[in-house]
Amino acid sequence: MEFFLFLLFLTFFCLVTAVIVYYVKILFFSAKTNYRREELTDIRGDVFRICLDVLESGGNLLYGAGVFFTCALFVWLWSLLGSLLGEKGPGPFEHIFHMPIFFLALFFSFPFLKDTYRGESYLSLAKPALSGLALGNLSAGAVHYGLDRDLFFLFYLLLVLLQIPVLVFLWNREPIFGVSFEEAETSIYEEDWGSPSQTTETKPSEWEEEDGPFSDEPDDFGLGDDPFSEDFK
């Protein structure tokens, strides 16, 4: 029962985080200023692409998904130690074993790992690893808080406010405290708009002609070709 609820909350938090990431991208990280109505309302495809982008970190879905679920399950099993050592209800062991220590350890040690193992491909697995540790921690906390009230609400709220914003920056490929966890490249859900940190808007010159709707058609008698042959000149 608890494991089923854990998987349910893990899916829920993953989708909710993807929705937040999408709208934060539109409001703050996008270079666009005008949006179609469908871009604001019909977001199901983009949400699933954001989740898939997290699991495909490093270009390998198998490795990315394996690291994500392994980290999430590890955090859930770690949280069970608080229930075994403590008693029912909020207690010190429950709160200690629900603290995101592994998430914070990987987050703050990544700059040193990046300098030490520069250029190594497995550094790209930091994104699914951090995501699995964060979402696994929130899912395990939701299970324990919902079933037995083992956590104080303010403590669980602090877990949410501490980890979700980091995931928003991470999934949007934006630097966090000056540290970039991924190489700057266009994500699969960023093709319609660019990031202001990666793209620069260039205004067309007033003398530069823009392509019209008929620019691709052959111009047999237009201004581009001289309709008179050399014999009539």
Image: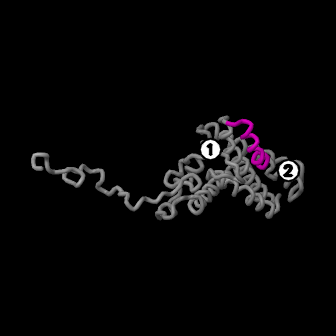
Q: Amino acid at mark 2?
A: Gly
Could you say which disc has been placed on residue 183 in the image?
Answer: 1
Q: Secondary structure at mark 2?
A: helix
**Contact between labelled residues 2 and 1, with CB atoms less than 8 Å apart:** no
> How many residues crowd mark 1 within 10 Å: few (<14), some (14–19), many (20+)?
few
Q: Position of residue 195 (x, y in %)?
A: 56, 54
Indicate whether residue 53 is drawn in magenta. no
Instruction: Specify the label residue 31 is tagged with.
Output: none
Q: Quadrant of residue 110?
A: top right
- In percent of width and height, residue 120 lies at 67, 35
Judge from the rendering whether residue 230 lies leftward or rightward of residue 120; answer left or right. left
| Magenta stretch bounds | 102-118
The Cα atoms of the two marked residues, 1 and 2, are separated by 38 Å
**Identity of the residue drawn at 14% across and 50% down:** 228
Relative to 228, 23 lies left or right: right
Residue nearer the viewer, 113 or 79: 113
Disc number lying in front (1 or 2): 1
Q: Amino acid at mark 1?
A: Glu
Q: Is residue 32 above or below residue 63?
A: below
| Side of 174 relative to 136 (left or right) | left
Picture mark count: 2
Residue sitting at x 77%, y 57%: 159
First in residue order: circle 1 vs circle 2: 2
> What residue is disc 2 on?
82
Tell me if mark 2 has few (under 14), some (14-19) or many (20+) residues whose alpha carbon lies within 10 angstroms of its own: many
Image x and y of residue 185, in percent: 57, 46
| Residue 103 placement (x, y as % from top left) | 76, 48
Q: Secondary structure at mark 1?
A: loop
Q: Nearer the viewer, residue 199 or 92?
A: 199
